[in-house]
Amino acid sequence: MGEVKKKSIPILPWMRSPIDVSLCENCPLNLVPCLDPRLEAALEKMGISSLFPVQVAVWQETVGPGAFERDLCINSPTGSGKTLSYALPIVQMLSTRAVKCLRALVVLPTRDLALQVKEVFAAIAPAVGLTVGLAVGQSSIADEISELIKRPKLEAGICYDPDDIAYELQSSVDILVATPGRLMDHINSTKGFTLEHLCYLVVDETDRLLREAYQSWLPTVLQLTQSNDESLFPYPNSFLSSTFGSLKTMRKFGVERGFKGKSHPRLVKMVLSATLTQDPSKLAQLSLHHPLLMTMGKKRYQLPEKLESFKLVWYNNPYGEFTYFGLPKSIVISNLMSSKVCESKLRPMYLVALLQELGEEKCIVFTSSTESTHRLCTLLNHFGDLSIRIKEYSGLQRQSIRSKTLKAFRDGKVQVLVSSDAMTRGMDVEGVRNVINYDMPPYIKTYIHRAGRTARAGQAGRCFTLLRNHEVKRFKKMLQKADNDSVPEYSVPSSSLESLRAAYKSGNLALPP
Ligand SMILES: Nc1ncnc2c1ncn2[C@@H]1O[C@H](COP(=O)(O)OP(=O)(O)OP(=O)(O)O)[C@@H](O)[C@H]1O
């Protein structure tokens, strides 16, 4: 699949003057202005001693002098700590709330991602008496409702009509982390579930979420959090245009919704991605208020600082028997002609050679589809003496199996995860040192998110991409978009390829058809 040439879209005026997060430095917790000491202690318990640059910059725009006056669009690289960048200010701001009700909603595209983000909130929110809930369809809807909604204590002997007590129901959670599907289920059918008190809306992995309509979850949420009082908004359409305008565009009123008769601050939106869309029509869906763009450096796409990218090029051999990856070019250049080699059988051998080379290091292998993930994983597990625990993780599997696999991978019981793009975005697994693109990613955004599963939180990591000869040029062009001009070639030692080939030829390696 080729990189589709798109018509260039004019950049929105407010996107032309972003805040450069890379100008901020790590800030030790004791120097973070106004940080609640209870949160400082909770962060230390998580092993965090200072805030990362994106967290410092967002803190300044929220708890700091920026005072949440603008909606934030955060475009910073994978693994730079975006989750805590929004979780911390939200928890700090809600720490003084007097009444429990749902005030912050965080939407993520997948269950595993939502679970991961919930863990971050759960590590800090209880320190200031806040409760975090999860709406992802992991448990039955009835169980989820009982977690999210507090039922009034019924007095013995009195018979209540369930319809009558609907307004008595209260939220059990202050913060909800949700996937769009389950969120819509609760909006549509859970008694007592309301967004009327919502102060913060976070749309994480924004570009991915905006691509999917999911029963119109976004317009529904926005509608449910808008004022009923039309006099506050005489020109509703002008809000959409604020997305297109500059800082001079008309600002929304400070008071947007009533809260039991009292004024309540407007809904603050924070949208984030490592590859934030610049498409005005997509951004318009978010109805952003006076938005502020925060980026890392000048380039639109940025790879983590300590990520090393390598390519392994597949040269075809006209003699039909053998194909070379990473062998000296002198051997193969003269042979670059069409081939009858059965690539589907030999290709995994090079992957095995690479995996053997990487030894015990945790590794994710990405393929282009759920089907090829399944095939490749089955095939790798047939390589006789491979002493590496390899598991599949894909959208084809049941959630319970995926979660089990992910846990085993996190715990180090599985070293290699073969995955479709289900693992591409946001997933944070400690100790992943290598990412291998078994199939070349079709877009630079895909490369960024896949490669971003390693080299997180300032750690080093490597991304290897297996390329067919004809893909080399396109790959180079694609990586230039992320300011990566030259990707060195990685050589798997010919000795390991030779021994694998010998094993294969002698029939010791059982390759299923
Ligand atoms: N201040 C910090 N100090 C140390 N580690 C941190 C800090 N902030 C975040 N981390 C760790 O960095 C890792 C990456 O954080 P996070 O998942 O939020 O990145 P991200 O920017 O959302 O990445 P992606 O774009 O891939 O979703 C996590 O393991 C997290 O625990």
Image (cartoon, helix red, strand yellow):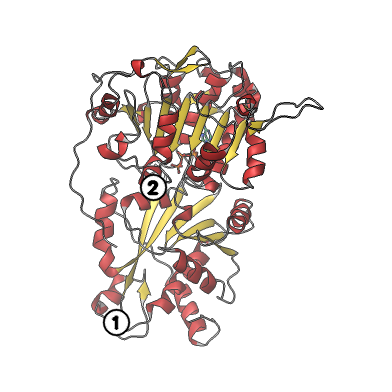
> Any atom of ligand 1 within 8 Å of the CB at mark 2?
no
Q: Quadrant of residue 338?
A: bottom left
Image coords of residue 69 (percent x, y): 38, 18
In the image, 232 versus 206, the foreground residue is 232
Image coords of residue 66 (percent x, y): 39, 17
Q: Earlier in the sequence, mark 1 or mark 2?
A: 2
Quote the CA–CA distance across marks 1 and 2. 41 Å
Q: Is residue 245 left or right of residue 47?
A: left
Type of amino acid under label 1: Ser
Can residue 52 be seen here? The reply is no
Question: Residue placed at 18% from the left, 44% from the top?
Answer: 8
Label 1 close to label 2 by CB (< 8 Å): no
Q: Quadrant of residue 157?
A: top right
Q: Which residue is mark 2?
A: 212
In the image, 195 versus 316, the foreground residue is 195
Can residue 329 be seen here? The reply is yes
In the image, residue 73 above or below residue 136: above
In the image, 246 versus 493, the foreground residue is 246
Disc 1 on helix, strand or loop?
loop
* Mark 2 crowd level (few <14, some 14–19, many ≥20, 10 Å Cα): few
Question: Residue placed at 49% from the left, 57% from the top?
Answer: 364
Q: Which mark is residue 145?
A: none
Q: Which residue is mark 1?
A: 339
Type of amino acid under label 2: Glu
Question: Residue placed at 24% from the left, 20% from the top?
Answer: 249
Of all residues, the one furthest to the right in this rendering is 157
Q: In the rendered view of the protein, which quadrant contains the N terminus? A: bottom left
Image coords of residue 446 (percent x, y): 37, 52
In the image, residue 308 above or below residue 64: below
In the image, 168 versus 45, the foreground residue is 168
